[in-house]
Image (cartoon, helix red, strand yellow):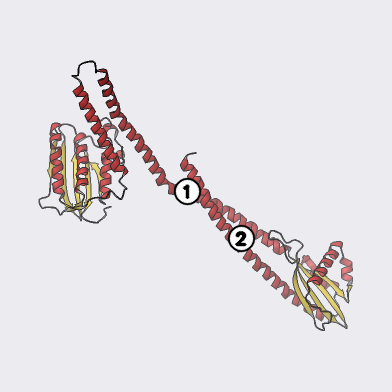
Amino acid sequence: MTVFKKVRLRLTLLCTGVTALILFLISLAYLLVAESNLKNNQFQSFQDDIKTILGNLESQQVITHDWLAKLEAGNRYLVFLRDNGVSLLYESLNETEDRELLYQSVTAFYEEHKTEEVSSRYASYHTEFTFPDTVPFLSMGKDRYYVSYCYIPKNQGQLEAYILRSLTPVYDQIYRQRFLFCLIDVLAVSLLYCFFRYFVKLMLRPVVESQEKQNLFIAAASHEFRTPLAVIMSCVSAMKEDESRTFDVRPDFYGILENETDRMSRLIDDMLFLTNRQNPNQQLQLKDYELETLLLKCYEAFERMALEKKVAIHIRLPKDPMPPCHCDPERISQLLAILAHNAVSYTDAGGKITFSAWYGNGCHSIVVADTGIGIRDADKKKIFNPFYRVDIARNRKGHFGLGLGIASEIVKAHKGSISVEDTPGGGSTFEVRLPRRGKVLG
C-alpha cells in the first residue's frame, strides 16, 4: 500500500469516526428525550384512566365479574381488589402462582415506599407509581408496570385496589425505535465512509499530482544531467589516457568540457527558477517599460542565429507607440528569448519567424509565429509542463524541456496568459497577453 493510500484510509477513518461519534451522541440524546416523553405521556394516560376506573368503583354497589373481565381483557390491566382485606371471588377464580407473587411484590413495594397512612381517610384516595422504580437503560422493561393504589371507603368498610398496566408494549415501542435508530446510524456511517473516502481522494488529488510531478521532475532532471556528465567523464578519461601521447587533441576536449559544463549550469539555473517560483522572496522587479524595446532587443539577439540556419526573421510593431507595460523587464526578456530560441531551433531552412506586438482591451499582446515543425493538438496543453518535450524534439541538443515551463511561470507571475495555436500553413504561433497594470487576465 502506497503512502497516499495509507493517508487516504486513515483520514477517511478519522473523519468517519469523528462524525459517527457525533451522530451517535445526537441519536442517544434524542432517544433519551423521546423515551422520557413517551413514558411521561403513557403515565399521564394511565392516570387519566385510573380516574375513570375509580369513578366506576365508587358508583358501583356490586362489582361484577363481567366488568372486571372486560377491564383485564387483552392484558390491558391487572386488577387486585380487597374488600376489608379479603380477596373477591373473581380473584379466587383467576388466581395463579405468578399473579399472587406479583401482587405480593407490588404490595410490599408500596408499603415500603408510601409516605402517609390512608386507613383513616373518609374519602377516596389514589396514588400512582412505577414498579419497579428503576431499570437499566438497555433493559426492555419486561415485568415492569404502572401501578395505581386506590382506597375507597364503603359502608363502614374499605375497598382497596391495585390496578396494574404492563409497560411491555411501551418498551416494545422503545425497542423498535432504538433498533430503527441503530439501523439509520449504521446506514449513515456507511454513507459517510463512502463520502469521506471520495472527499479525501479529492482533497489529496493536488498533493498526489504534485508528488507525481515532483517524481517526474527528478527523473527527468537526472536524465538530463546524465548526458553531459557522461560526456565530461568520457573526455576526462580520454585525456588521462592521452597523458603520455600528443597534446594536439586536448583543446578539443577542453572545448567539449566547457560546452557541457555551460549546459549543466544553464540546466541548474532553470531548475532553480522553477523550484523557487513559489518563494515569496523571489519577487518580480516591476516597473513601467516599453515592450517594443524588449522585442527589438530579442529580434537583434536571434537575427544572426536565424540567418545561420537560413531562416527569415521579421518583426511587426504598431505605428503608434504602445503604453508602457508594468512588468519585470529581465523576466520578460527571458520569456521572449525562450520563445525565440524555440522558434529558431524548430524551424528548418527556408522557414520564417515573425515577431509582432500590439495593445488593446487593456492588455499587451506579444506573438511569436514560426513555420516550423508544429505541435500536435495532444501536446499543446502539456508543453508548458517542466521537462515535457514532444517526440520530434527529443534529440535536439540544448533543449531540456524547461523553457516553456519557465515561460509559463513568468507569465503567471505577471498575471497574464500564454497560449499556442497552429500557424496557417504549418508551424506554431505563441501568444502572450500581459495586463497593463494590476489586472488579472483569464
Near mark 2 (Cα within 10 A), the count class, few <14, some 14-19 or many ≥20, is some
Which dot, 1 or 2, sits closer to the camera? 2
Q: Of the residues under marks 1 and 2, which one precedes in the sequence?
A: 2
Using the rendered image of the protein, determine whether residue 13 is visible from the camera's viewpoint.
yes
**Separation of marks 1 and 2 at Cα, in angstroms:** 28 Å
Label 2 residue SS? helix
The numbered dot on residue 74 is: none
Q: Which residue is mark 2?
A: 28
Where in the figure is residue 407, as x and y percent of width and height? 25, 43
Where in the figure is residue 310, as x and y percent of width and height? 13, 32
Near mark 1 (Cα within 10 A), the count class, few <14, some 14-19 or many ≥20, is some
Judge by depth and name the residue closer to the eye, 395 or 377. Answer: 395
| Amino acid type at image mark 1 | Tyr
| Amino acid type at image mark 2 | Leu
Residue lying at 75% horizontally and 77% vertically, measured from the top left: 51
Relative to 23, say whether 149 is above or below.
below
Residue at far left of view: 319
Residue lying at 22% horizontally and 26% vertically, measured from the top left: 256
Q: Which residue is mark 1?
A: 198
Where in the figure is residue 261, as x and y percent of width and height? 25, 31
The image quarter containing residue 262 is top left
Relative to 322, say whether 247 is above or below.
above
Judge by depth and name the residue closer to the eye, 127 or 293. Answer: 293
The image quarter containing residue 308 is top left
